[in-house]
Image (cartoon, rainbow, N blue to C red):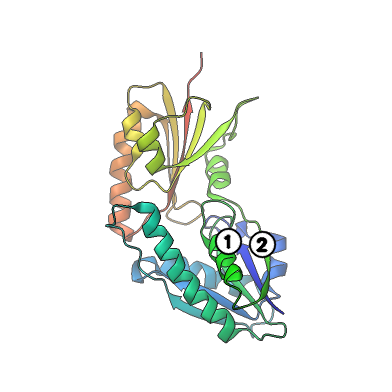
Amino acid sequence: MRRMLLIGIGAGDPEYVTQQAIRALNEVDVFFVVEKGEQKDDLVALRREVCERFIEDQSYRIVAVRDPERDRTAAAYASAVDDWRRARAEIWERLIADELDEEGGTGAILVWGDPSLYDSTLTIVDSILAAGRVRFAVDVIPGVSAIAALCARHAIALNRVGEAVHVTTGRRLAREGFPENAPDVVVMLDAHCSFGNLRGEEIDIYWGAYLGTPDEILIAGALDDIAGEIERVRAQARERKGWIMDTYLLRRRTA
């Protein structure tokens, strides 16, 4: 039977790649790489660097495919994401069927960060299996998440003693505000600097972009004091590179 490995490669630094991931890399016949356009070529380059650095037998193949466009103008966000995932699933299903030996070929997708955290790969692979047209086994190798990298780079603990941590998106933060049941909130996928809506509250922010890469940016302090700086730096970085990945922790001050 075919086999698919979903390998977490960490949040940008090749040294985040674990020993377990390295063992898995060396079992792969074909790597499937999603290309997101010229502006994000460095994301593909990192994946190629990981392969070149850690794989002993260079006989593997890399099959690159253009990522389908997601409709970012649609009013219904969830349905637009569903449509995009279905389009991705159709492409990946065809590639797995065409590129992997049915009698034991091993393919892999290298997942930025960790496959279990705000990443669509597992959901898409599950939908392919549910369709039943292509059969394969799945193994997931965890990676260093953006959250772990953020806390390490700021030298802070993610949680406080006996307290909860809430993980959410910028879209939900903008709609729902700071959750009442958790003093610490991690925000991912925030394209609109939703933390700005929380000015005037007693909150500290630990922000990081391009974590683990040579372009890494770290800013931390009282939200009221540095919200504007983060917005400015983020806009400049996105303009310079054409894309940005950032994550932040909001920490409500306690007496």
Which mark is nearer the camera, 1 or 2? Answer: 1
Secondary structure under badge 2?
strand
How far, Cα to Cα, is label 1 from label 2?
Answer: 9 Å
Total tally of numbered discs in the picture: 2
User: Where's residue 178, x and y in %?
Assistant: 43, 29
Q: Residue 140 carries which label?
A: 2
Residue 70 figure quarter = bottom left
Depth check: give the residue in front, 90 or 184: 90
Secondary structure under badge 1?
helix
Residue 153 vertical placement versus 111 (above, below):
above
Q: In this view, does 174 lie to the left or right of 105?
A: left
Residue under the point 39% across and 31% down: 177
Q: In which quarter of the image is the N terminus?
A: bottom right
Q: Name the residue under label 1.
A: 122
Residue under the point 44% across and 53% down: 210
User: Where's residue 209, x and y in %?
Assistant: 43, 49
Q: Do the residues labelled 1 and 2 touch (CB within 8 Å)?
A: yes
User: Where's residue 208, x and y in %?
Assistant: 45, 44
Depth check: give the residue in front, 215 or 78: 78
Q: How crowded is mark 2: few (under 14 residues within 10 Å), some or many (20 or more)?
A: some
Mark 1 or 2 closer to N-term?
A: 1
- Residue type (three-letter) at the residue carrying disc 2: Val
- Residue type (three-letter) at the residue carrying disc 1: Leu
Depth check: give the residue in front, 246 or 100: 100
Q: Residues within 10 Å of mark 1 (few under 14, many from 20)?
A: some
